[in-house]
Amino acid sequence: MRKPIIAGNWKLNKTVAEAVEFTEGLKKQICNINRAILPEVVVAPVFTSLYSVGQILKDSNCIKMSAQNCYWEEAGAFTGEVAIGMLKEVGCSYIIIGHSERRQYFSETDEMINKKAKAILAADVTPIICCGETLEQREAGQTDSHIKSQIEAALDGISSEDVARSVIAYEPIWAIGTGKTCDSVEANRVIKMIRATVSEIAGESAANSIRILYGGSVKPTTIEEQMAQSDIDGALVGGASLKVDSFAGIIDGCMKVKA
Ligand code: 13P
């Protein structure tokens, strides 16, 4: 069985002091739960908080840490960028790439996302590769073709073994930060289509291993229905991951269904 992942993407939120307070609070609330039933829990702070959060998490492996972005080169004249080895050094085991906000506001292309995915996997870190359609694409009946092309581009040239240990997050753009969750049955349908695409690219075994998350207005009140779907392996949570109680509520809901 695929181990579920509940990941909190903090986006541009929390000072170092706030990130530390949250992490200590979450640790108290969940780290005494039996690891066999606890999903993989991941937090993704801003770059400036990674070191401090990493220090709090380094002795327990009940919460893992992700960066929200990276650059694919190891070092050099790339002002403003952060290398994967540097993120690994402070304790990141995941890196989110291709989030729709980065595609939309920072002109991230499929080609850049593919380069990042390859470099992350080469460094033995796990990419969380985001995909998702706009409302216009959904209304024009282009959801499946758009997502398929995003996944094919992101995974281009990556070995089946590396695809198998990657994570994909399906985040319909119209559901992000809007309170409008995608219907669970529909989210599951798209995620099944993503899995079929992965199977075409990397084979059935990789498709059965890869974890595919849903993201977009996930809350403690929606997670049980989402986790009850056959192909939804967890959630990438924005707004509801910023408070310990609501994030812990989502983790709890996941355990009720999947433990
Ligand atoms: P919300 O949960 O705030 O809708 O954000 C989802 C998201 O973009 C996570 O990456």
Image (tube, rainbow, N blue to C red):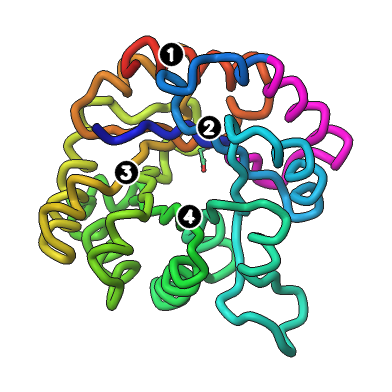
Disc 4 to disc 3, how far (Cα)?
19 Å
The residue under the point 52% across, 54% down is: 96
**What residue is shown with label 3?**
211
Q: Is residue 25 above or below residue 237?
A: above
The verdict on label 2 being within 8 Å of ligand 1 is no
**What residue is shown with label 4?**
100
Residue 219 among magenta residues: no
First to last magenta residue range: 9-28
The residue under the point 65% across, 40% down is: 10
Q: Amino acid at mark 4?
A: Ser
Q: Residues within 10 Å of mark 2 (few under 14, many from 20)?
A: many
The verdict on label 1 being within 8 Å of ligand 1 is no
Q: Residues within 10 Å of mark 1 (few under 14, many from 20)?
A: many
**What residue is shown with label 1?**
253
Q: Position of residue 39 (x, y in %)?
A: 44, 27
**Left or right for 116, reference 1:** right
Q: Residues within 10 Å of mark 3 (few under 14, many from 20)?
A: many
**Left or right for 106, reference 82:** left
Q: Which mark is residue 41?
A: 2
